Image (cartoon, rainbow, N blue to C red):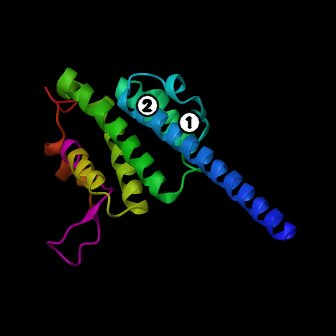
Amino acid sequence: MARMILWRETLAWSLLAAGLGLTGWQGWQWLQASQVNQVLANPKEPIEKHAPWLSQTPEGQLLQAWQLTRRGDSTHALEIYGRLEQRLPPALLARAKYNMGNAYLSTALGALSEEGALAYNQAAPLLAMAKDAYRDALRHDPTLWDARHNMELAQRASPDITPGIRNEQSQEETELKTTTERAWPTIPGFPKGMP
């Protein structure tokens, strides 16, 4: 009888300890989720202010890069995205590539809107990098429709100029016609060398 009571007491104390441990763990999870929500609600403030532990995780660094982009500091954001490429799972890597493309695209479109066609030499490489980033994002997650849409915007701002296209008028003719002749009218700005 005494053994039965001892066994019941031990079981009760074990269940109580397990319940308290689980409650503590759930409380910690709730606190972390609350801190992440505070970070998301205040994108202009640094992560360390609300959730210092978050900046050590790849997800937190992805969030930090997103915040830097929102603040207009694309250079530092792109550095963080570049460091994260090897450590992110495919779903987050697609998001990182999408955000990289957004940073390149917004910088290029900002330069084009401020300076017009004169900034095309500055914007063209940024648009090309944006398109590459969107292609990579779609390679990792083909269902990312936002990347498809933004890639179309980058395509409209700067069409791809491929090295050559076959002249289909004559089948015997094997020389390649460069696309620069075809693409020249689509490039904004004034051609160099013209009076």
- At label 1, the amino acid type is Leu
| Direction from residue 99 to residue 88 in the image, left or right | right
Residue sitting at x 23%, y 78%: 172
- Residue under numbered circle 2: 39
| Direction from residue 161 to residue 169 in the image, left or right | left
50 or 18, which is in the foreground?
A: 18
* Secondary structure category for the residue under label 1: helix
Residue 27 x %, y %:
55, 42
Residue 193 x %, y %:
21, 30
Most frequent secondary structure within the magenta stretch: loop
**Around disc 1, counting alpha carbons within 10 Å, would you say few (fewer than 14), some (14 to 19), or many (20 or more)?**
some
Q: In which quadrant is the N terminus drawn?
A: bottom right
**Above or below, 2 relative to 81:** below
- Residue under numbered circle 1: 54
Residue sitting at x 33%, y 56%: 163
**Above or below, 94 relative to 36:** below
Q: Residue reaching furthest front? A: 1
- At label 2, the amino acid type is Val
**Around disc 2, counting alpha carbons within 10 Å, would you say few (fewer than 14), some (14 to 19), or many (20 or more)?**
many
Q: In which quadrant is the C terminus drawn?
A: top left
Q: How many marks?
A: 2
- The answer to whether the residue labelled 1 contacts the one labelled 2, judged by CB atoms less than 8 Å apart, is yes
Tell me, yes or no, whether the highlighted magenta stretch contains residue 72.
Answer: no
Residue sitting at x 53%, y 39%: 32
Stretch in magenta:
155-176
Q: Residue reaching furthest bottom? A: 171
Residue sitting at x 26%, y 63%: 165
Residue 164: quadrant of the picture: bottom left
